[in-house]
Image (cartoon, coloured by chain):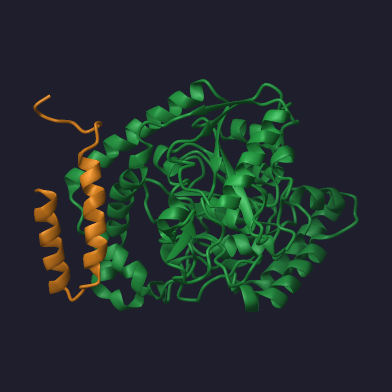
Chain colours: A green, B orange
Amino acid sequence: MMTIEEFGKRLRAREITAAQITDECLRRIDADNPTLNAFIRVMADEARQTARDRDRELAAGHDRGPLHGVPISIKDLIDMRGVPTTAASRVREGHVAERDAAVIAHLRQAGAVIVGKTNLHEFAFGTTNEDSAFGPARNPHDPSRSPGGSSGGSAASVAAGMALATIGTDTGGSIRIPAAACGIVGLKPTIGEVSTDGVVPLSRTFDHVGPLTQSVTDAFLVFHALLGDHIAAPPAPMPLHGIRIAVLRRYFCDILDEDVRARFEEAVARLRSAGAHVDEIQIKHADLIATIYLHISLPDAAAYHASALDAVPERYTPNVRLRLEMARDLLAEDYVRALAGREALRREIDAALTQHDALMLPTLPIPAPPIGAATMDVAGHAQPVRAMMLRLTQPFNVSGHPAISIPVGRTRQGLPVGVQLVGCRHETDGLLKIALACEPDLASGSASAV
Amino acid sequence: MTIDAWLKAAIADAESRKLPELKALLEALAKSTAALRQADFNDDARR
């Protein structure tokens, strides 16, 4: 499927209409959603009507900007007025949103055409999309495998050409994990940058909203639309020569699938050959990231779900219910210790970025896991899938730094591999500029192309 | 509350709520909490 950037050029050259691209996305949804289960709700009639309206506007000279007429899918954790927000859970039965989430209002202003709401891990509380009241979403590259999660249906929808972009949420990696697993780009902005108003929370401390797209340029365009800046133009390309990149090794590269390691090292070598200055650094408290994350995110989730757990526990999927019940047992003193840990980690990553323009590490230590797998073999050892999926993304939910996952090729089985670039807090645009410079050298095996 | 005392109470609570499957998760969480408590970023009234 064409990128937003390519569609925009063709739209304004009168070579294609919003109605035509929307019809193409809906045709692919009809063809592939029965297999991929990416969508919980398809909004075909509304999408076609909106697309026709955008075409009429453009013909009359009203151009809303880069997202004008662009088909986009929405994770079903985000409120759209008059439509249920299921969070992929039976707990939400009967819910209908009264208002648009802030990001939906911005997308409508930007002229986007919303084609439907996508499947996810129940309440975004998981990384594989297996625990959903609507059944698992599947990976377009291999439907026996997970698309990652929790924004798994979202990533599958873009990788399979059912939408040109999608909006996901990321509490421990839920944008970047499925982006890497499905071979597309996923951007987690700086914490607090994009409004979470009207988004069902998982952890209000760590929740982020952001785009999953087919290119870094598209991520820039959608990110700015989510901010309410729907006429932003992507920055001019900057030279890669002289960009200072720090590769995170200890902990971050300790446990990697053999093919993931190979693709990552090749990507580092390509950036170095292209003129980037590449160092290696360590983060002192890296070993404690998972425990810091758990002791903050679990109490957040427990507080939100407590009354529903008491009233309708049977409506949760079993795994999600158990982990939420576990969350209720944590002590306040350990929560406070974790807050101190978060500050320590944030300082360490800030310090690493004073000497470098970006940090670089793999997005996932493993390729997309088979649906139902509890463990995966990594270098001869069985590793728990959930811990593996979160291991390299959750550090930047804890610290709040912006991070982007970019495809860097495939495993020998044809499964996508992604790398992350991490930038300074409150400088998401700066990270995107670096990502734009790196993308041609990173994305050699690239994009969706299912 | 020590980790051992916390774990014992949490498992007893899980069993009283007819959630014995929680035991394994709580045991894993206890290990994670023990690591958190040993971290050098924690405050200590003696220091």
Residue A132 placement (x, y as % from top left)? 46, 72
Q: Is residue A413 left or right of residue A28?
A: left
Q: Is residue A6 left or right of residue A44?
A: right
Q: Which is more toward the observer, A276 or A177?
A: A276
Looking at the image, which residue is at 25% across and 65% down?
B24
User: Is A95 above or below relative to A360?
Assistant: below
User: Is A249 above or below relative to A71?
Assistant: above
Residue A33 placement (x, y as % from top left)? 65, 75
User: Is B5 above or below relative to A251?
Assistant: below
Residue A272 placement (x, y as % from top left)? 67, 29
Q: What count of labels does the image hold?
A: 0
Q: In which quarter of the image is the N terminus of chain A?
A: bottom right
Looking at the image, which residue is at 44% across and 60% down?
A385
Q: Is residue A439 visible?
A: yes
Q: Can residue A336 be seen in this view?
A: no
Residue A265, quarter of the rendered image: top right
Residue B43, quarter of the rendered image: top left
Looking at the image, which residue is at 12% across and 73% down?
B16
Looking at the image, which residue is at 47% across and 64% down?
A98
Q: Which is more toward the observer, A218 or A420?
A: A420
